[in-house]
Amino acid sequence: MPHFRTYDDTELHYRVLGPADSPRPPLVCLAGGPGRDAAYLGDLGGLAGDRQLVLPDSRGTGDSPAAADPARYAFPQLAEDVEALRAHLGLERFALLAHDAGAAVAQAYAAGYPQRLTRLVLVCPGSRLQGELPDDAQEIFAARAHEEWWPTASAAVRQLAEASDLGEVRELLFAAAPLAYGRWEEPQQAHAATEGEQLGPVPRAGFWQGVDEHLRLALLAGLREAACPVLVVTGDRDGVTGMRAGELVAESFPDARVRTLHEVGHYPWVDAPQLFAQAIEDFLHTA
């Protein structure tokens, strides 16, 4: 399995999917969670069919070791690991895709290394970095109360707020999972069943550690200098982050657009793989 040595001499793991002889440049892909094994990204709806995808396991997830210093789990520090991966791959400039909480890592990277990015894709991001937490995700969830799974999912959401036992949390996550998808069928159920085992509680807890208001504002100021084109993908059935958060994230960049996918939730490559992959490829090929 390939590894790279990052700034503090730790060896972190990454996977490469797709053809080595592709004429298209590779796409580095960051997982969310936070603290989730990048395996849940799969091949991102078939994106690996025509280009290489590079999927790092962040510290304490997948095959990457736990951090000796918990401060290394904070997303600005994870962005430094991305820079070490870029150097390891020998890429002068590259395209970066990030999902969910991984979008915070990608934004920290864009603020610190704007000259390194050719394109940036943020999939279903939250907007905590922007200082706002819109409530449209709750509205999306409530609008689906007529669906068969809703009573069980709604009860699980309430119980998650107080659950502490890891086994119970994993069961509740699966019970609440339908709110994250555009529909609740076999592909969605199979994808959701992996979440509990893929989450790392310690990396998750450390993700925002040390990010005070001064640093938050400094990162936002840095995004104004990130001149690369940015695509923010949202789903109109995303009961996790909703759509408004993506709009707020897009407003932080000088050159960003939002693409909302219809009947798609928080994992668009699961709900609509062909639509998602085509939207990403169209953006990456835009002159």
Image (tube, rainbow, N blue to C red):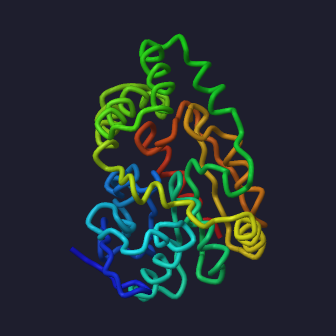
Residue found 42% across the figure and 56% down from its top:
35
When asked about the image quadrant of residue 38, the answer is bottom left
Residue found 53% across the figure and 72% down from its top:
95
Q: Position of residue 269 (x, y in %)?
A: 44, 45
Assign the N terminus to one quadrant of the image. Answer: bottom left
Whether 187 is drawn above or below 79: the answer is above
Q: Nearer the viewer, residue 251 or 27?
A: 251
Question: Residue furthest toward the left?
Answer: 1
Q: Nearer the viewer, residue 92 or 166?
A: 166
Assign the C terminus to one quadrant of the image. Answer: bottom right
Q: Position of residue 119 (x, y in %)?
A: 60, 70
Q: In the figure, is residue 128 to the left or right of 67?
A: right
Whether 67 is drawn above or below 203: the answer is below
Q: In the figure, is residue 212 to the left or right of 77?
A: right
Q: In the figure, is residue 254 to the left or right of 65?
A: right
Whether 47 is drawn above or below 221: the answer is above
When asked about the image quadrant of residue 270, the answer is top left
Q: Position of residue 256 (x, y in %)?
A: 72, 60
Q: Position of residue 205 (x, y in %)?
A: 47, 55
Residue found 63% across the figure and 58% down from its top:
231
Residue found 45% across the figure and 64% down from its top:
29
